[in-house]
Image (tube, helix red, strand yellow):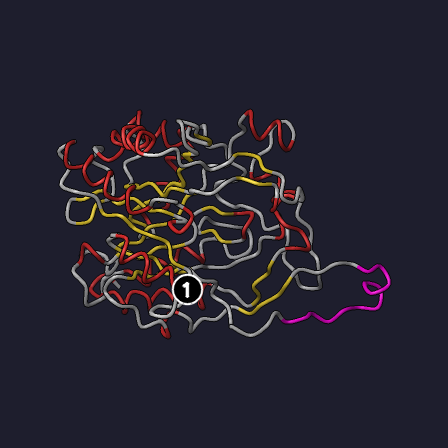
Amino acid sequence: MGARARVVAFYLPQFHPIPENDQWWGAGFTEWTNLASARPLFPGHQQPLLPADLGFYDLRLAETRRAQAQLATEYGVEAFAYWHYWFGDGRVLLERPFQEVLDSGDPSVSFCLAWANQSWTGHWHGAGKRLLMEQRYPGAHDDEAHFAAVLPAFRDPRYLTVDGRPVFYVYRPEEHPDIVGFITRWRELADRAGLPGLYLVAEVVDPIGEGVQYATAQRDGFDAGVYVRFPVHAAAPRKPLTRVADRLRRRPRPGIREYNDQAIAQWGLDGFTQPCVWPNWDNTPRAGANGLVVTGASPDAFGRNLRDAVELLSERPAEHRLLWVKSWNEWAEGNHLEPDTEVRHGWLEAVRTAVADETDR
């Protein structure tokens, strides 16, 4: 039988060296560099959190990408949403893993593109507001060039669709100076290319019915909005107990919040909005003491949020039951489905259990 929801996991391609990262952070930098250098910042803080089955992989290897796809398929993840970095005027970064997947036809797992339309800065790497790569929006000609660049992916039979329309995710629609024009142009270009349309998805981070982003996404012409928020209690960050030795050293601490495994059930999504579920969060490998750590996350708690999300989607047509998970492999943010040395396949097992058809259990 089929799955009860269509799980789409965000996929980070920054697990191979590129010249730009070599220049900014040192030769051979990848996301593993941040993870391997992480250290516990308070009693009970689990760092570094290390990969299990797949190890410290390199996404230039087809074998790695194939092993990821096999795990995803086995545990009920329908598609990867590859973060796509188009900075305007044809400037791209980290494009190699997805391009090789597209060109080779391997692996067979479905995919879509998620445009991370935001400038790169040194904020999460201790370099403050240092501008590394600026996100630009040159205008209509760039929209056309961007569409032409992704059209081969849209035409790939593996590409994730809703009612036949390729899914394209926009991370920060509010930062685009002409998002309505972008949407209009891309829909026209899709029509000219002979596509059955596009299924455009906006990320929204404010409460449903209460925030500007949510209302604007509908008005601007998106087909859906993905409600993204931390799975934490709304209370102010909890201060951990400070040992005398730590106080004498004036050791800085990250913010700490508690995982909320009842968050999804309280949302009450409407037909426009789709849920995003997080297994965990700890971005101290990137941000150090300026980061945020979520405590109390577990596969069981994650599984309850997943089941609630599945239930919220249950009355929709099967094609529209997109359940987004952040993320497949954001190791330096502490949110990943890939096996780790702490819970092994626990995050993946939670996904499989939550989306399995009743007759398959």
Q: Is residue 134 left or right of residue 288?
A: left
* Disc 1 secondary structure class: loop
The spot of residue 189 in percent (x, y) is: 20, 34
Q: Nearer the viewer, residue 11 or 45?
A: 11
- The boundaries of the magenta stretch are 238-250
Q: Is residue 247 magenta?
A: yes
Residue at (25, 65) in percent of width and height: 313
Q: Which residue is mark 1?
A: 206
Q: Quadrant where the N terminus lies?
A: bottom left
Q: Which of the 4 image quarters holds residue 68?
A: top left
Q: Is residue 301 left or right of residue 70?
A: right
Q: Which of the 4 image quarters holds residue 176?
A: top left
Q: Nearer the viewer, residue 69 or 152?
A: 152
Q: Which of the 4 image quarters holds residue 67?
A: top left
Residue at (80, 68) in percent of width and height: 243
Is 26 drawn above or below residue 109 in the view shown? Answer: above
The local crowd at label 1, few if under 14, some if 14 to 19, many if 20 or more residues have their Cα within 10 Å, is some
Q: How many marks?
A: 1
Which residue is situated farthest in the right direction here?
Answer: 248
Residue at (86, 63) in percent of width and height: 248
Q: Is residue 327 left or right of residue 153?
A: right
The spot of residue 318 in percent (x, y) is: 18, 58
Residue type of the residue flagged with mark 1: Asp
Q: Quadrant where the C terminus lies?
A: bottom left
Is 121 drawn above or below residue 294 in the view shown? Answer: above
Residue at (69, 51) in percent of width and height: 39
Q: Is residue 227 magenta?
A: no
The spot of residue 184 in percent (x, y) is: 23, 43
The spot of residue 168 in percent (x, y) is: 29, 44
